[in-house]
Image: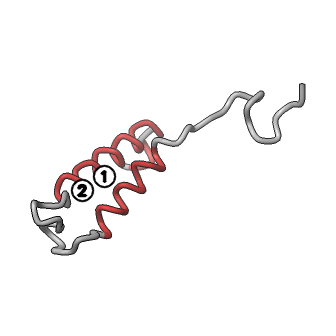
């Protein structure tokens, strides 16, 4: 399927799968360096971790806990 026909859940799933695969490919070896980039701090792996951190943020908050929500 193409993007206009994907649901938000499908898009998030594809982002998650891609980021996880990227982390597997760029996982540091025994010497502490990325096997593909040959650097100790791989920018690609850092970006994949950032994507996973962003995807795992809560997507909604109940009104009583939302910033600027109703006062009790």
The structure's colour scheme is secondary structure
Furthest residue toward left: 30
At which x and y percent is residue 26? 20, 61
Q: Residue at x 42, y 42 (%)?
A: 5
Farthest top residue in view: 72
Give the structural element (helix, strand or loop) at label 2. helix
Along the horizontal axis of the image, is 22 left or right of 52?
A: left
Q: Residue furthest right?
A: 72
User: 42 and 1: which one is in front?
Assistant: 42
| Quarter occupied by the N terminus | top left
Q: Residue at x 76, y 29 (%)?
A: 63
Nearer-the-camera pick, 1 or 32: 32
Distance between the alpha carbons at the discs numbered 1 and 2: 5 Å
The residue under label 1 is 19
Q: Is residue 54 above or below residue 47?
A: above
Q: Position of residue 51 (x, y in %)?
A: 41, 54
Neighbours of disc 2 within 10 Å: few (<14), some (14-19), many (20+): some
Using the rendered view, name the quadrant where residue 23 is placed. Answer: bottom left
Where residue 27 sits, quadrant-wise, is bottom left
Marks counted in the figure total 2
In the displayed structure, would residue 48 be above or below residue 62?
A: below
Q: Is residue 6 left or right of residue 35?
A: right
Write the residue at 17% across / 61% down: 28
Residue 12 figure quarter: top left
The quarter in which the C terminus is drawn is top right
Q: State the residue at coordinates (27%, 69%).
A: 42
Q: Is mark 1 in CB contact (under 8 Å) with mark 2?
A: yes
Dot 1 surroundings within 10 Å: few (below 14), some, or many (20 or more)? many
Left or right of 72 in this view: 50: left
What residue did someone put label 2 on?
A: 22
Q: Secondary structure at mark 1?
A: helix
Residue 34, how many percent across, how many down? 18, 66
């Amino acid at each position: 399927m193409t993007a206009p026909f994907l649901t938000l859940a499908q898009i998030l799933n594809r982002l998650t799968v891609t980021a996880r695969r990227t982390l597997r490919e760029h996982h540091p070896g025994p010497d502490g360096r990325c096997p593909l980039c040959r650097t100790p701090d791989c920018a690609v792996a850092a970006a994949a971790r950032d994507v996973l951190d962003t995807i795992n943020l809560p997507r909604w908050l109940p009104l009583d806990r939302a910033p600027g929500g109703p006062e009790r």
